[in-house]
Amino acid sequence: MREKTMLTDLYQLTMNAAYFDNDKDEVATFDLFIRKLPEDWGYFIANGIEDAIDYATSVAFKPNEIEYLRGQGLFTNAFLDFLEGFRFTGNIYAVKEGTPVFPNEPIVRVTARRTEAQFLETALLNIINFQTMVATKANRVVNAAGGAAVVDFGLRRAQGEDAAMKGARAAYIGGAVATSNVKAGMEFGIPISGTHAHSFVMSFPTELEAFRAYARTFPNNATLLIDTYDTIEGARNAAIVAKELEAKDGRLGAVRLDSGELADLSVRVRQILDKGGLRYVKIVASNDLNEYKIEELRKRGAKIDGYGVGTEMITAKPVAAISGVYKLVEDTDGAKIKLSAEKQTLPGKKQLFRVTGTDGKYLHDIIALDGEEHEGAPLLEPVVLDGKRVAERRQLSEIRGYALACVERLPDALKVTKAAARLYTIEISSGLQRLVTSLKERYSAKPVLTA
């Protein structure tokens, strides 16, 4: 991932130039965390961690990048010489990718020389914020769908190739069973799934002829799009083709609804299929779906076995972005705190503990100072030590299984479509609370005025 070294904000370089010039490159620790949950969300699924590790361990400026920076006229030759040998040599602790997390909990903890730790900020936030957002949105959609399958249809609506690829991966971790994105399927090993377009049906004299042509090419498990003209007539035509396939030892897989009153139409289509002895043929729905619409469809008794979700899952609509941040929490002078209104940070090098009940469900979390002992399992694990990856990159299937198993252990109230805020308890350890109080007193003290 060397080509991503320059994926940074200019101020990372200007700050580092000033640190370099002022001989201020001592060890510092930064936390990456998310400030708050979007409306209705009960948790996040931390995602992008593996990519963040790869980025940190591959940072290196190439000659053409140094020359580009030289041409900006901002930096001294001495600083550019420093960048030529710049590498990350510090330590990173992180939660496992796929771990449910909550506001203000450290997801990644970086300890390194100040220039190194500072430089990682922009790229780590870019990598983790988006993928966490999409993984969580996808999981919300999957929860709303109950036992019905969810397929990622978002490629054509994603903000460019990188978002489409990382979004497909994140959606799969969040519980989608497949993607329409063939490149994502090839690169990540995600199952691929798809149907045909309305244009295919319109390319033949009749809908029935189009269905027969498609089934001729794909006689086993094809999905027919039945709403090009009249959905009910389309269902009848699909039933005819399904019986023709049966006579040739083939099987129709599903029909797809992409418009209209999906709940009512699905019931009528189910009746047509069942009457024809086609109970095995599934009904798939699409059409700008999201978790709220899917929940409503289920409440109305829709007979839908799977959902293709595109725009609103790959973009996490209506959540445009999540508030992940990267803040200094400690350096050689001691713990650091930010006291800005509504943006106060938790100081010091920390560990995150998760407490589990006898039933296996998560009860609450504890944010504590590193070195404090508490009940529960510590979630921050070493992934990079002395600049080298020490945690083997996990397979996508393993991450997905871990994420879904963790979500299963969350309180059910967090997984509903409209989760209330602050349903999950996050405790602050006594040691951390004392540190917060002492730093508040230090930095909030008013100067004594003398005559």
Image (cartoon, rainbow, N blue to C red):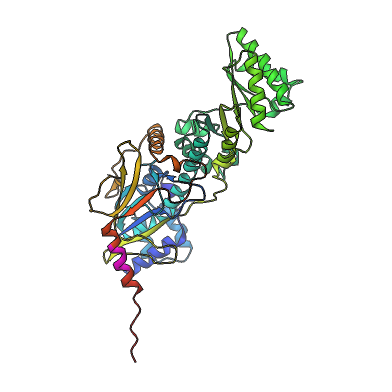
Asked whether, in this view, residue 131 is left or right of residue 197, the answer is: left
Taking depth in this image into account, of 122 and 432 the one nearest to the observer is 432
Q: Residue at x 66, y 16 (%)?
A: 239
Q: Residue 47: x, y in percent?
A: 42, 43
| Residue drawn at the location 70% of the way across and 22% of the way down | 234
Task: Name the image quarter holding the C terminus.
Answer: bottom left
Q: Which residues are magenta?
A: 434-439
State the residue in front, 219 or 404. Answer: 404
152 vs 255, nearest the viewer: 255
Q: Is residue 58 visible?
A: yes
Taking 364 as reference, is 284 above or below it? Answer: above
Q: Quadrant of residue 36?
A: bottom left
Task: Say whether residue 106 is visible.
Answer: no
Q: Is residue 174 magenta?
A: no
Q: Is 444 situated left or right of 419 in this image?
A: left
Which is nearer the eye, 126 or 371? 371
Q: Residue furthest bottom?
A: 451
Q: Is residue 434 above or below residue 426?
A: below
Residue reaching furthest top?
Answer: 247
- Image x and y of residue 207, in percent: 73, 21
Q: How many marks?
A: 0
Where residue 92 sits: x, y (%)? Answer: 31, 50
Is the magenta region chiefly helix, strand or loop? Answer: helix
Residue in the picture at 69% in, 29% down? 198
Q: Position of residue 135 (x, y in %)?
A: 47, 41
Compared across the picture, whether 1 is left or right of 241 comes to left
Instruction: Work out which quarter of the rendered image holds the N terminus and state it.
Output: top left
